[in-house]
Amino acid sequence: MNRHQLSLLVILIVCIVAGFTLIPRDMLSLNALQQSHQALSAEWHQHPLLGAVLYFALYVAVSALSIPGAALLTLLGGSLSPLWIAIPLVSFASTLGALLAMLASRYLLANWVCGRFPRQMATVNAGIARDGAFYLFALRLMPLLPFFLVNLLAGVTRIGAMRYWWVSQLGMLPATVVYLNAGRELGNLHSLQDILSPGLLGAFALIGLLPLVSRKLLARFVQH
């Protein structure tokens, strides 16, 4: 095991410990968040810096370990703090978690990912090889593949870590803002399906496809 693999393994172990320490068993459900919101809000406003640090650590752990619940944590962040604080907090936490998951796939889980998701891996590999960062940007905006699966599959592509970071952060930002804004009405939500309407999903799809279409049109124009 080389230095990079050892460092990543240590970080993932820290994430696992943080996950089990900070996440109560029944916390990551919409009903549980709504019931505990008042108590969490009081604690957050009493200790805002500590609350932000713990929230950031929890979000990174959930994202890095592919634990279902990132969307609920985003709602919680929107309900506890102003948007100007919540947006960078969630954006950087989710991107850091995604990067750790991608690196874990690349350096620790590559063989398992290739054996477990061969069809999806072939599709993503081909897309990254053909369109590079534009393809990853489209995947981040359009929910064709789950968040955790994009992280794992990107690990077995040739995309660089820094490019993966900034493209993921940019591509996930619109949905982050939507969920954080919805979190301001946490008590009135009945399900996560109440947040992303078909029209909004269509808008995200158009934004995600725009760079791909523009790139193909530009390449055709240059050829002619």
Image: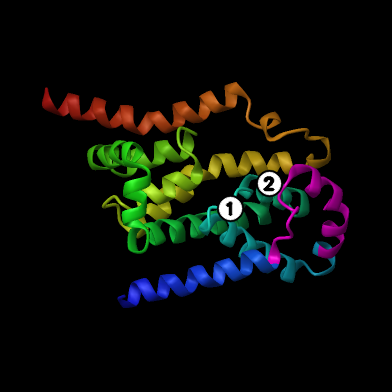
Residue 112 vs residue 163, the one in the foreground: 112
Is 131 within the magenta?
A: no
The reply, left or right, for residue 188 in relation to residue 193 is: right
Task: Residue at 38% x, 29% y: name it.
Answer: 210
Question: Is 93 above or below relative to 175?
Answer: below
Image x and y of residue 130, in percent = 23, 37
Image x and y of residue 163, in percent = 35, 54
What colouring does the structure picture have?
A: rainbow
Residue located beneath label 2 in the image: 72
- The amino acid at mark 1 is Ile
Q: Residue furthest left?
A: 224
Marks 2 and 1: in contact by CB < 8 Å?
Answer: no
Q: CA distance from mark 1 to mark 2?
A: 11 Å
Image quadrant where one finds the N terminus: bottom left
Callout 1 crowding tier (Cα within 10 Å): few <14, some 14–19, many ≥20: few
The reply, left or right, for residue 19 in relation to residue 104 is: right
Q: Which residues are magenta?
A: 22-43
Res. 67 mark: 1
- The amino acid at mark 2 is Leu
Image quadrant where one finds the C terminus: top left
Question: Is 136 above or below relative to 67?
Answer: above
Residue 7 vs residue 76, the one in the foreground: 7
The reply, left or right, for residue 193 in relation to residue 132 is: right
